[in-house]
């Protein structure tokens, strides 16, 4: 790993910590040349699966696409980029355990919604509006009602 200050290859690891349920390793490093200290994060590689699109086309899974979709839904919400990456990793972990080498976009979207529901309600509605392609306000209402207590739904 190159130093971020002098770009030397001579760095040493001072401390390592596993985070995000074993999905990431954070390492504290120090440059042997200039003594600059910095942190790196190792994340396992994205899934090696194919995504079946609505058009019946197939493409390789992209963590970046999932991240960008979640990031867009959570724009201007109190959710950090690290939390969004954690969400991506948790969604991927579920996809790995429940699906084989191919997964359709509907499964990815519904898995993302399930995880997003516990993180941010507004982000959930935003993601659902794109994923479920709401055409009218009724689509929004149905999703919002999932968050309301039963007595409020009857009003």
Image (spheres, rainbow, N blue to C red):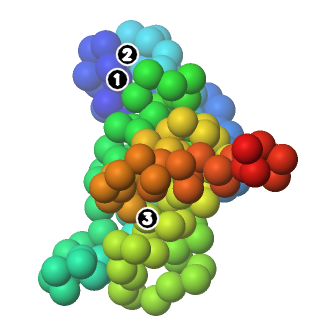
Residue 62 visible here: yes
Tags 2 and 1 touching, CB below 8 Å? yes
Dot 1: what SS? loop
Q: Which residue is mark 3?
A: 109
The CA span between labels 2 and 1 is 9 Å
Which comes sooner in the sequence, label 1 or label 3? 1
Q: CA distance from mark 1 to mark 3?
A: 38 Å
- Judged by depth in the image, the label closer to the viewer, 2 or 1, is 1
Q: What residue did someone put label 2 on?
A: 33
Residue at image coords 35%, 52%? 136
Locate residue 36 relative to residue 121 in the image: left or right.
left
Q: Position of residue 7 (x, y in %)?
A: 26, 22
Spatial CA distance of label 2 from label 3 is: 47 Å
Looking at the image, residue 94 lies above or below residue 28 = below
Quadrant assignment for the N terminus: top left
Give the secondary structure at mark 2.
loop
């Amino acid at each position: 790993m190159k130093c971020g200050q002098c770009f030397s290859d001579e760095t040493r690891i001072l401390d390592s910590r596993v985070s995000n349920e074993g999905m990431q390793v954070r390492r504290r490093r120090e440059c042997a040349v200039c003594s600059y200290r910095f942190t790196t994060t190792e994340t396992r590689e994205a899934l090696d699966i194919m995504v079946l699109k609505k058009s019946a086309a197939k493409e390789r899974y992209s963590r970046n696409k999932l991240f960008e979709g979640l990031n867009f839904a959570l724009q201007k919400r109190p959710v950090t980029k690290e939390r969004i990456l954690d969400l991506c990793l948790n969604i991927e972990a579920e996809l790995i355990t429940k699906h084989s080498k191919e997964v359709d976009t509907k499964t990815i979207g519904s898995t993302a919604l399930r995880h997003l529901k516990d993180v941010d309600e507004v982000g959930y509605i935003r993601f659902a509006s794109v994923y479920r392609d709401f055409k009218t306000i009724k689509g929004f209402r149905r999703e919002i009602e999932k968050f309301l207590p039963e007595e409020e739904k009857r009003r």
